[in-house]
Amino acid sequence: MDSFLDKIKSAKKIAIFSHISPDADALCSSFALKNIIKFNFENKFVDVFNDGPIGQLYDQILKDEVINPKPYNNYDLAIVLDCPTLNRIGKCEEIIKDIPTVINVDHHETNNKFGDTNIVSPISSSTCELVYYMTKGLGLKLNSTIAKQLYQGIITDTHCFSTFSTTNLTYQAAADLTKFKFDNNAIKKHYFKNNSLGKIKLLTTALSYLKLYKNAKLITMKIPYKAFEETNATFDDTLGIVDNGISIGEAEVSAILIESEQNKIHISLRSKGNVNVGEIAKKLGGGGGASVAAYQAKGDLKDIEKQLVTTVFPYLNEDKEKEEIIF
Amino acid sequence: MDSFLDKIKSAKKIAIFSHISPDADALCSSFALKNIIKFNFENKFVDVFNDGPIGQLYDQILKDEVINPKPYNNYDLAIVLDCPTLNRIGKCEEIIKDIPTVINVDHHETNNKFGDTNIVSPISSSTCELVYYMTKGLGLKLNSTIAKQLYQGIITDTHCFSTFSTTNLTYQAAADLTKFKFDNNAIKKHYFKNNSLGKIKLLTTALSYLKLYKNAKLITMKIPYKAFEETNATFDDTLGIVDNGISIGEAEVSAILIESEQNKIHISLRSKGNVNVGEIAKKLGGGGGASVAAYQAKGDLKDIEKQLVTTVFPYLNEDKEKEEIIF
């Protein structure tokens, strides 16, 4: 951590990066860290880069911030946030390749320590939680803009404190951050109580295709392309639907097959922990962690579902009854 | 608060009460307060009473606790938790009428201060949060059993920290309580990630009946009796479904009509705050607060829906387009 502080202190021009298709944690940890550096150290020049696309949901995060400025400065320090591997920064590799020193700050267990300095904390619920505790640990100051940014990363990555990654330290960070003046109810409303009609329609469609296999140990849902045609919904509106499957008491694995374009299928997998869905996704050409994973496939929705189900079956513990229940 | 402590100190036999059809906050604040008194003061005799029925979801709270003991002792102090009015304790009024002193501990804004001592804190997310801060304020000790009980009341009453009643103090309480040793992930799983198949089927049914009125300002959903017949679902499984309606961006009011028995309809109402649904429910023979209310009705599901919609319409702000969108 001293090394982190020394590197910040000796740097003049800093570039901050996070992963492609950023979520709130990636964007907020980037801007928060920029603002922490500028608030605590005089005359630092800090730029934030991201290889989008950035979902509309995050418009309010971008509002008062500059992203992807041009021309580039001659940066002497790069900080990469929320990326388990360096290639997750996408096209920004073009910029980082000329920067002599890289600090890697991340909360993913699979982080491969690609930095010259690596601050990797898998017990943190989010990179924003980690940035908060780094700031606190280094005795740096916060303000309400920074607190609001860090809080957004924490509540989104923990699905409003409901994930198992939420710890005592997460609650403490939320308690400390909400002492600063910002409207935390507006943030909750924005992320969690602001469904579009299209989103509710997609949820209805997905649930209508819900299938149970192997005594409900495997749950699948589908959203065929026609559901997108019939609604104004977008791919972003499908987020979280898969969690309805894994919430079912008996479920070990839950999957949603989303046909976002004709015959182009995105498959999201969830596990309660006994089955490693990252391994299953890898077999099918994708990746991810033990409990959250995904892959892409091309072809007929029914065929892709059959392939998935057949691949998952050997991972499920058999019990006496081998019948298949489908409703 | 001194008065509270003095009364506890001078009492020998204490009876604790909470509201009929108790939720986790009512049960947990009762048992937690009993355990706090017994852990901090020697030789106190404390009994907990509740006029059920108690949902199966709360079986684990009851497990190591004694509830509704007989015969009654000659209590010299009554503490009533989580009740805005004394009649909310139901049949337990029979027991309390002989107790000379009543302490009223509650977080409802509508509390009518029925006690000899009244500790009413509408800024608390839950009675468990209030009991935690009373304990802290009075310098009393906690243990992990008590911490686990208080945490359960807080996470259930705040829907896992997602309600607007969740404040900085709620996060701080959660941070302090989860420092004690208990499995907070198991609690989250029990209350929030443990849907029955029946519950998911009822959600699917309700969403399939979703209707939008007045440019989606009013949302209705229905669960006809046949859905209960076709599934193993119970009335408890309908909890929370109405929140899908009010989560829609444009919605001002959301309602669910649940036909729990043939022609016997339970209607739950939610509001974003501009429309007082308590007033609407009162007009139709029920009651509740400005944003959460309910009433019962008998008759044909369609007729009851028509009556509801007609009653709600005048409360919605009209805008230029008066068309009705239904899908």
Image (tube, coloured by chain):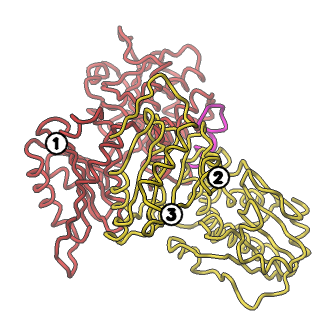
Chain colours: A red, B yellow
Which residue is found at the position 82% from the left and 60% from the top? B138
Q: Which chain is indicated by disc 1?
A: A
Q: Which chain is indicated by disc 2?
A: B
Give the label on residue B282, or none: 2
Disc 1 and disc 2: Cα gap in Å? 49 Å
Residue B101 is one of the magenta-drawn residues: no
Give the label on residue B298, or none: 3
Stretch of the chain drawn in magenta: A171-184
Query: Dot 3, crowdedness within 10 Å: few (<14), some or many (≥20)?
Result: some
Q: Is residue B205 left or right of residue B51?
A: left
Identity, as a three-letter code, of the amino acid under mark 1: Ile
Q: Which chain is indicated by disc 3?
A: B
Q: Marks 3 and 2: in contact by CB < 8 Å?
A: no
Question: Same chain for the residues at labels 1 and 3, yes or no?
Answer: no
Identity, as a three-letter code, of the amino acid under mark 2: Lys
Of A266 and B102, the residue lying toward us: B102
Q: Nearer the viewer, mark 1 or mark 3?
A: 3
In the image, residue B76 lies at what x, y percent? 88, 79
Q: Quadrant of the N terminus of chain B?
A: bottom right
Asked where in the image residue A74 lies, by quadrant, the reply is top left
In the image, residue A16 lies at what x, y percent? 41, 24
Disc 2 and disc 3: Cα gap in Å? 16 Å
Question: Regarding mark 2 in the picture, which secondary structure is present there?
Answer: helix
Q: Is residue B80 left or right of residue B54?
A: right
Is B325 above or below relative to A240?
above
Which residue is found at the position 66% from the left and 83% from the top? B66
Residue A182 is one of the magenta-drawn residues: yes
Residue furthest out toward the top: A71
Q: Is residue A285 left or right of residue A192?
A: left
Q: Nearer the viewer, mark 1 or mark 2?
A: 2
What residue is disc 1 on?
A265
Q: How many marks?
A: 3
